[in-house]
Image (spheres, rainbow, N blue to C red):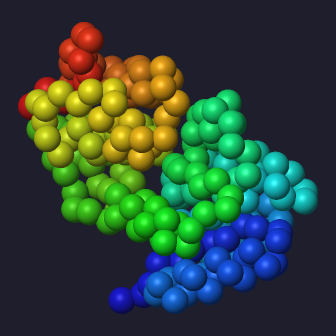
Amino acid sequence: MTSPCILIIEDDLDIANVLKMDLTDAGFEVDHADSAMNGLIKAREDHPALILLDLGLPDFDGGDVVQRLRKNSAVPIIVLTARDTVDEKVRLLGLGADDYLIKPFHPDELLARVKVQLRQRTTESLNMGDLTLDPQKRLVTYKAEELRLSPKEFDILALLIRQPGRVYSRQEIGQEIWQGRLPEGSNVVDVHMANLRAKLRDLDGYGLLRTVRGVGYALRG
């Protein structure tokens, strides 16, 4: 079986080499780009399983890279940053990053987060009535029509469909989808749920998503 390929977008060669060594020792294939533009080219041409993205790139900001990637790709993105502020974390998650690590970090934590992101995308297809979710293809259909979701909307739906009828609290969704890294009082979960509801409604699936006031969300089983 071919090992997953991880693309490192990092202009500091010393950091990139350390990351490459740690990931290679863990059994991954690793590619490297030293600028945002080279990273976008490699991401488009080589289709990595996951991207490790530094924010402080020489040509343009890593946040812009996330936005450009999200225009046509659901590849998991873990941002590596020294910017440890709530506003910056919320901005990155809102742009479409799946996770982030604050520099400096321990190699074991990096490997754990990489494995979590890859594991979320390698499970079997899930079905609930006319709703079908394929984690490997990152594809959702309802009544045979494709439901176009953002990466986080997909992950939320994948969480809910595994236990139809179960009510997940906002805190549980934040813990599972964002590894508990949402700031207290953030409305990011509610925003994503509203978007998901609207997209389901467009395919006559509005009633699929249930809101339990003051508790959380569920899929109607």
The residue that appears at 67% across and 49% down in the rendered structure is 66
- The quarter of the picture where the N terminus appears is bottom left
> Which residue is nearer to you in this view: 33 or 43?
33
Observer able to see residue 53: no
Quarter of the image where one finds residue 9: bottom right
Q: Where is residue 22 in the image (x, y as percent from the top left)?
A: 57, 82
Number of numbered discs: 0
User: Compared to 78, does 44 lie above or below?
Assistant: below
Q: In this view, does 41 lie to the left or right of 157?
A: right
Quarter of the image where one finds residue 190: top left
Observer able to see residue 201: yes
> Which residue is nearer to you in this view: 139 or 156?
156
Q: Where is residue 45 in the image (x, y as percent from the top left)?
A: 66, 71
- The quarter of the picture where the C terminus appears is top left
Q: Which residue lies furthest to the top in this view?
A: 213
> Which residue is nearer to you in this view: 104 or 204?
104
The residue that appears at 67% across and 30% down in the rendered structure is 87
> Which residue is nearer to you in this view: 150 or 177?
177
Q: Position of residue 208 (x, y in %)?
A: 21, 25
The residue that appears at 35% across and 22% down in the rendered structure is 197
The residue that appears at 68% across and 58% down in the rendered structure is 103
User: Compared to 1, does 43 lie above or below?
Assistant: above
